[in-house]
Amino acid sequence: MTTQELTDLLGLKALSTFEPREITGVFISDMLSDVMAGAKSGNLWITVQTHKNIVPAANLVDASAVIVTNGKQVPEETIELANKHDIAILWTESQTFELVGRLYSLGLATQ
Amino acid sequence: MAECAHTWNMTNRQFGFAVFERCSHCRIIRAYYAEQDSWDDYKEGEHHWSIVENAQTFRFDLECEECGMYVSYDDFLGLLYCTSCLDDCPVEILRKKYEEDNTWILVGFGFLPESSANPYSAEKLEVLSEYFNQRRDTSRSRVKILPNSLIDKLSLCRGDFIHDVGMLSLEPPEERKPLF
Ligand SMILES: [Zn+2]
Ligand SMILES: [Zn+2]
């Protein structure tokens, strides 16, 4: 499944512009250090973090998209940086638990 | 025997803190990795250190799964991304050049002040770049980690560390004060 297909399927809001990418798995953390240490190329990164530092972290580990949950407001500077680096920032009002349940039922899992 | 092409794995991961402190007497900045955070001022000889910032981070080593070559990063502070704050900064000039090639530049910092005078090992930064490139789909883009000694005006640099700064609370962090 690609990031664009997932966005359409779950009705996620795309906050940045991006080239669709194949999703390899899911990584959940609110710590950049966790992500840098463990996320894999093509992973969806699910977080409530919205600081612009999430963009270079996602870029470093080659995440396919960042999904911001719980309806957290994402600052404009984060979106601007994401556009610059072709990082998909997707957004949902759903709680992380609920979103992860839906991803799981679509067959996505930790990779 | 053919030379090993190296397949790097991250090993010996420990979560801790990047501590930034400033001497109120001579104004120098010192930064290093510590297992514990601390916020108390302290005296050390002539120096009087005050904490500027504690950021959650982690330390690690890299090991080749083929030949067992081991590279320690116990003297590594972290990665900073360039925010294009200074047009004439060598990092910004290289950033533009590499970006045409779909290569993202990051700046690898050793501890301070040591690494501003003595560049962090180029071999170790090369291995670190190789490691992160092995973790990504390099047909799309690559990363390249440059030494912090390239930043000639550190006190003016507004680059940002990829550290968990102000992220202990889940509220949107306030704009961070300059570090240097
Ligand atoms: Zn090797
Ligand atoms: Zn001093």
Image: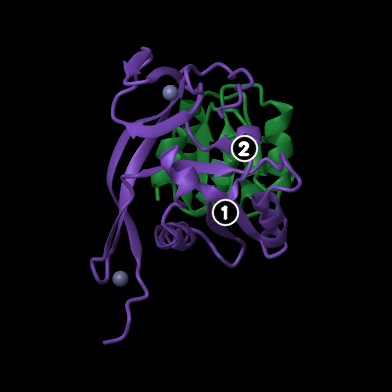
Chain colours: A green, B purple
Q: Which residue lies furthest to the bottom in this view?
A: B1
Label 2 packing within 10 angstroms: few (<14), some (14-19), many (20+): some
Measure the alpha-carbon separation of dots 2 and 1. 35 Å
The amino acid at mark 2 is Gly
SS at badge 1: loop
Q: Which residue is label 2 attached to?
A: B159
B30 displayed left or right of B177: left
Q: Which quarter is ligand 1 in?
A: bottom left
Asked if residue A87 is positioned above or below residue A76 in the image, the reply reads below
Closest to the observer, B128 or B177: B177
Closest to the observer, B100 or A28: B100
B68 displayed left or right of B25: left
The amino acid at mark 1 is Met
Closest to the observer, A34 or A72: A34
Q: Position of residue B32 (x, y in %)?
A: 38, 34
Q: Where is residue B66 in the image (x, y as percent from the top left)?
A: 27, 71
The residue located at (39%, 58%) in the rendering is: B124
Q: Position of residue B93 (x, y in %)?
A: 71, 54
Label 1 packing within 10 angstroms: few (<14), some (14-19), many (20+): some
Asked if residue B116 is positioned above or below residue A50 in the image, the reply reads below
Q: Which residue lies furthest to the top in this view?
A: B40
The residue located at (30%, 51%) in the rendering is: B61
Residue B170 visible (yes or no): yes
- Which quarter of the rendering shows the N terminus of chain A? bottom right
B6 displayed left or right of B156: left
Q: Which residue is label 1 attached to?
A: A1
> Which chain's residue wears label 1?
A
